[in-house]
Amino acid sequence: MVGTVSRLEQLVENHSELREALKRLQAEVKVDNFIRKIKDRIAINGLIRYNEILEGCISGQNSMTKMVEEVAVLFADHMDLLEEFCEFLP
């Protein structure tokens, strides 16, 4: 897979629209893989809570700091998930 991605990057390097589309696709795949890890590791109630936490931040009810604090509590027994979550933060 890494070789394929590398080759795709070479093919689109001179095409800014395609390059941006590839970046978006890579980001989407990364998010999908992360959500799959969450589903595999925590109970359904935890996944529902995760979505509620994100929605609270997106809707403006909670700050990003509050969101990170709540996700840290949720993933307390899964530090690798917390580290990966932090990779998505601006």
Image (cartoon, grey):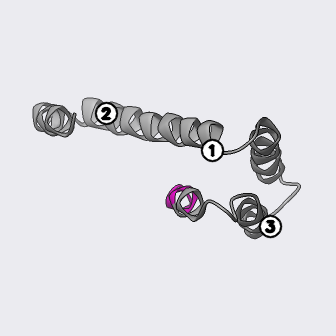
The reply, left or right, for residue 79 in relation to residue 69 is left
Residue 84, how many percent across, how many down? 51, 57
Task: Please give the name of the residue rendered at 20% of the width and 40% of the height, measured from the top-left corner.
Answer: 2
Q: Amino acid at mark 3?
A: Lys
Say whether disc 1 or disc 2 marks the residue closer to the N-terminus: 2
Mark 3: few, some, or many residues within 10 Å (few <14, many ≥20)?
Answer: some
Say whether disc 3 or disc 2 marks the residue closer to the N-terminus: 2
Mark 2: few, some, or many residues within 10 Å (few <14, many ≥20)?
Answer: some
SS at badge 2: helix
Quadrant of the snapshot with the N terminus: top left
> Depth check: 61 or 79 in front?
79
Residue 65, how many percent across, how many down? 74, 70
Observer-side mark, 3 or 2, equals: 3
The reply, left or right, for residue 86 in relation to residue 16 is right
Image quadrant where residue 39 sits: top right
Up-down relation of residue 11 to residue 55 (above or below): above
Say whether disc 3 or disc 1 marks the residue closer to the N-terminus: 1
Which residue carries the number 3 mark?
A: 66
Q: Amino acid at mark 1?
A: Arg
Residue 64, how many percent across, how many down? 73, 64
SS at badge 3: helix
Does the magenta-highlighted stretch encompass residue 37?
no
Quadrant of the snapshot with the C terminus: bottom right
Which residue carries the number 1 mark?
A: 41
